[in-house]
Amino acid sequence: MSEPYIAETQVGRWTSDGVRKAFEALGFTVREWPLTQHLEKQVPADALFFSPEFSKVFGLQYKTLYRNDEDSWPIDETQHKTLLERRWIFYCCSELRDVSDYGIALHYARFYWSRFNFQPKLLAAGLFRGPAYVRWGAFYRGLKACRIGARVRTQSDLQALLEPYTGHARVREVHQMQEFFLADFKRRVLFAEQRVR
């Protein structure tokens, strides 16, 4: 029977904290904003002034490592279809096996594009077994170079990215996604999904 090394909610929280700290270390101000209300109420006044030259949206779908004959991350087929439709959302698969490493959770993260054919699990063993992934440094460089994420110039752009999900479906998708970020590279601000405490 397969079981997780660490609960997915913990892995997601610790990795999100790592993303926030990494942006802060790069000189960004981190602001949290709610994402589960209607869109008109989702974007705070400050976010209405995103840099039209260089704001990027990216989402992370956290996966925790399961122990079995081969360590792996289970993949849900319905969720995978959603990620295929939203190329700006990435699988963030944590290799964390010990809770004492929580402070460096971002260093244990693999970022996968969702563009692979569905498979019920991603295997943790071997670099060349399964889809390609990158670590945080390469992920951030790709984000900055516009190879990762979706460029957002206006509130309408943001609305178009989030549009397919409204009401209860929207809330469910946001919670399943785990984390949503809007990075304004010109003003050096990271808007991060506000966590429900």
Image (spheres, rainbow, N blue to C red):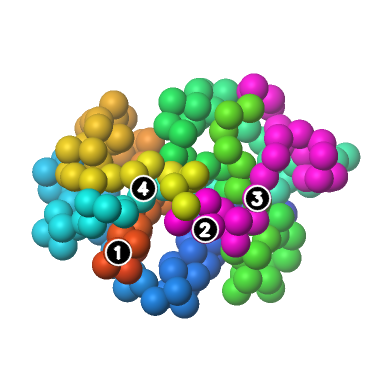
Three-letter amino acid code at disc 3? Val
Residue drawn at (31%, 59%) of the image: 184
Q: Which numbered circle lies on residue 113?
A: none
For label 2, the residue is: 140
The mark that comes first in sequence, 1 or 2, is 2
For label 1, the residue is: 186
The answer to whether residue 171 is left or right of residue 19 is left
Spatial CA distance of label 1 from label 4 is 14 Å
Q: Would you call the spot at circle 1 few (<14 residues within 10 Å), some (14-19), or many (20 or more)?
A: few
Residue 126 visible from this viewpoint: yes
The mark that comes first in sequence, 3 or 2, is 3
Give the image location of residue 56, x and y in percent. Answer: 36, 50
Q: Is residue 52 above or below residue 46?
A: above
Three-letter amino acid code at disc 1? Lys
For label 4, the residue is: 57
Q: Which residues are magenta?
A: 117-144
Who is closer to the viewer here, 82 or 152? 152
Quarter of the figure with the C terminus: bottom left
Residue pushed farthest right?
Answer: 69
Q: Nearer the viewer, mark 3 or mark 1?
A: 1
**Helix, strand or loop under label 2:** helix
Spatial CA distance of label 2 from label 4 is 12 Å
Who is closer to the viewer here, 101 or 106? 106
Three-letter amino acid code at disc 2? Tyr
For label 3, the residue is: 134
Give the image location of residue 4, x and y in percent. Answer: 70, 49
Spatial CA distance of label 3 from label 1 is 25 Å
| Marks 1 and 2 in Cβ contact (< 8 Å) | no
Residue drawn at (54%, 61%) of the image: 15
